[in-house]
Amino acid sequence: MLNFNVPHVKNSTGEPVWKVLIYDRFGQDIISPLLSVKELRDMGITLHLLLHSDRDPIPDVPAVYFVMPTEENIDRMCQDLRNQLYESYYLNFISAISRSKLEDIANAALAASAVTQVAKVFDQYLNFITLEDDMFVLCNQNKELVSYRAINRPDITDTEMETVMDTIVDSLFCFFVTLGAVPIIRCSRGTAAEMVAVKLDKKLRENLRDARNSLFTGDTLGAGQFSFQRPLLVLVDRNIDLATPLHHTWTYQALVHDVLDFHLNRVNLEESSGVENSPAGARPKRKNKKSYDLTPVDKFWQKHKGSPFPEVAESVQQELESYRAQEDEVKRLKSIMGLEGEDEGAISMLSDNTAKLTSAVSSLPELLEKKRLIDLHTNVATAVLEHIKARKLDVYFEYEEKIMSKTTLDKSLLDIISDPDAGTPEDKMRLFLIYYISAQQAPSEADLEQYKKALTDAGCNLNPLQYIKQWKSRVPKKMGILLSRVMNTGSQFVMEGVKNLVLKQQNLPVTRILDNLMEMKSNPETDDYRYFDPKMLRVGGGNYIEYQNLVDYIKGKQGKHILYGCSELFNATQFIKQLSQLGQK
């Protein structure tokens, strides 16, 4: 697309054609986790601008547009044509554009005498966001439209529900067009997941029926359609497991998402500027905000994002020591040869005896990159550690695991809720909700009142509990049995302070459902799943805890590959907020 919809030749030595990239917020969200500014520059993108920003004419440069085909966007593109902003226009739509909107663009081009300047118009079918090689999310800009709250609102009308389902199905359809494969669909009955499955099945069938215009045949796709193996798409409703999104976690990526501002692979940190001597009454200094991209290029992140946090802290320290040793070696060699302060060019002119030093100095760019990553992860891990210590997150993680695995508790739940030093009001509410969801028998009214008083005294908002009570009363008896089985398999670990908290791999409900369907096991959890003639999608929101659990599971399955997707990606704070809004009604 960025190469004017012509395949990019990797080893071409010619200069790229310089161009402008124009995107809307949807396009920006899709591109930003995939390509850095440097990578865009390498592809010839000199400027990347939002469609609805004030843009000056650049009449001798082509423009690549990447936008949703909305009324507002089409109007602005027509305005660009009338104003003759660019040399030529390559129009790429994230989702398929309707004929009437295409005619609007054609009329605007005719009126502006710019028909020859509209070089190409493409439906890209890219209405989803890829966060990892094996993880995608359907929505970001309009995620409240497909959120857990939106799907489970008691006052939702049929028309509103149709809109929600159509939005999810459009993104899923785009995903499979990009994948170049028609999936086998499995889903739980009587849930939002089933509604998505029925609509997606219909849309796929309609497209396959139209042989001339089918998106799953022909040379336009990759090798997906030539494979005899069709992927399995498992659609799972969030209501199957409400405990996992509330669970305090212990792996690096999931912790970063839980306690820091981590969004579309970018983490934003507030750097605390130390207490400085300032005149009395002076305004406190503003905290500096720093952003870091945590991407597949970052080898440390790729290796450790699924590791327990203490292992990550240890690895950061080891990397730092290794870097210092390399840096000291370069300094030592330069010192022996009296070359302090000399630049690399001068060093490379010396005799063969200096080959060792030349080699050491030539690795300096690599060393500097290593230092940048070490600084990045030192800052991120330190910020996470501050939250762990301040909120006693290791205690919460251990206690929740014991609740979910029905292990004997060494401290009463009331004691933790009442402890003013243990976590925030939200932490306490998350812990209690996990206890309430996991309990095979709901606490008596007297006990519940006692808990509610303790939660209120701790500053908790009780609305999420209101909703979970309603939700639990609606859960069918069969689902209740499954839930108790779901909650009976937490992980076991040894706990002696933060450093020794060890995870034992256990499959979460979503992983067990996938395992049953992939391995064709007979199990009450999945026996009544509907079958339409493994990809995993969470309808109603997903999280990094489930993603990591699936990644760990598939490591033991040779030759199998899993992609985890969700209608939206939320952390516990965002999920609690949705439960609170549902509890107010």
Image (cartoon, grey):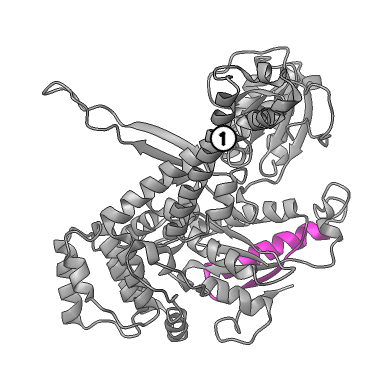
Overall secondary structure of the magenta section: helix
The front one of 455 and 256 is 256
- Residue at image location 69% in from the left, 26% down from the top: 354
Quadrant (top left/top right/bottom left/bottom right) for the N terminus: top right
* Occupied quadrant, residue 419: bottom left
Quadrant (top left/top right/bottom left/bottom right) for the C terminus: bottom left
The front one of 328 and 478 is 328
Residue 188 makes an appearance in the image: no
Residue 382 makes an appearance in the image: yes
* Occupied quadrant, residue 207: bottom right
In the displayed structure, does residue 553 sit left or right of residue 154? right
Question: Which structural element holds mark 1?
Answer: helix
User: Taking 305 as reference, is 238 above or below it?
Assistant: below
In the displayed structure, does residue 170 sit left or right of residue 386? right
Q: Position of residue 340 (x, y in %)?
A: 55, 20
Q: Is residue 320 magenta?
A: no
- Residue at image location 18% in from the left, 71% down from the top: 415
Magenta stretch in the rendered image: 181-209
